[in-house]
Image (cartoon, grey):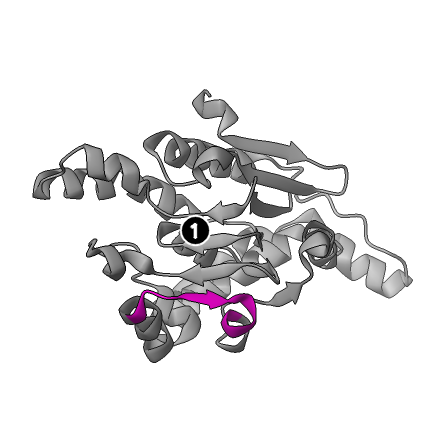
Amino acid sequence: MSDTDLFLYELRDDHIAVMTLNRPDKMNALSDGLAKAILEGIERFEADQDAWVGILTGNGKAFCAGGDLENMRVSSMDEGDWVDSVAELMPMFNALEQHKKPIIGAINGFAMGGGLSVANACSLIVAAESARFGMPEAAVSVPNFSYFDLWKTVGYRNALELSLTAEAFSAEHMQRIGFVSQVVPDHELMEAALKFAARITKNGPMATAGAELAMRFTLNNPKEDWPEKAPKLWKALLNSDDLREGLSSFAEKRKPKWKNA
């Protein structure tokens, strides 16, 4: 399978891009090829002006089972190999974590290890009832490299419980601790994700993208930086056709026609 086949991209007529990890025979484990394909797919999504919201899911029985431990075992990795392996994944994680448009994770099956980090990078998460989440590295004494921001989502102690126990947790548990937005029956997963995305695409795409960037900004920057830096996040929106259209449609009591410009 070529790298281009490892990540499927489908732009629908309703401005929703469905993106699928496509390595089902390996439970979508993060090989170098899949990591590269994810990076390129996210870059494509960001550049696609007709894609206002993304849905990220996995083909087969897993969303993403994490790192490809089989390849790690057979390669007799030393310390330098570990560092190099992590470095090769970081461009993908950075692209996911810094995405500029909303992405809904539609989590089917397992989201484990690095797969949990991929899910955590999504804006919102819809999970199938059978989905399982965890950080299993400690169970095989593998270094844990990819969870630096997880505590911001679920809190310090919940993140530590995931890491120290190395157990798999249910979708319902992950919803209780704030990781998952919705839990739905397995057969309703994509329908629920599409409905969730449609609730976002009815709004101005520049405004929804800006709202997430602003939320991320306030999470990662001290308050004293807000007055100077925060207005820059809204500069494009304040000069946009969509702002004028939004105000006009409100005054005229009609549905807005967004241009994403």
State the residue position of label 1.
Answer: 118
The residue drawn where x is 31% and y is 70% is: 165
Is residue 219 shown left or right of residue 80? right
Q: Is residue 247 above or below residue 108?
A: below
The residue drawn where x is 45% and y is 40% is: 28
Give residue 157's position: percent from left, percent from top. Answer: 33, 79
124, 59: nearer the viewer: 59
For residue 255, say whether it is visible.
yes
Q: Residue furthest right?
A: 253
Q: Quadrant of residue 133?
A: bottom left
**Tally of numbered discs:** 1
Does the stretch in magenta take in 172? yes
Q: Amino acid at mark 1?
A: Val
Give residue 246's position: percent from left, percent from top. Answer: 76, 58
The residue drawn where x is 23% and y is 44% is: 86
Does the stretch in magenta take in 206? no
Q: Quadrant of residue 172?
A: bottom right
Quadrant into which the C terminus falls? top right
Q: Quadrant of residue 162?
A: bottom left
Is residue 8 shown left or right of residue 136? right
For residue 230, say whether it is visible.
no
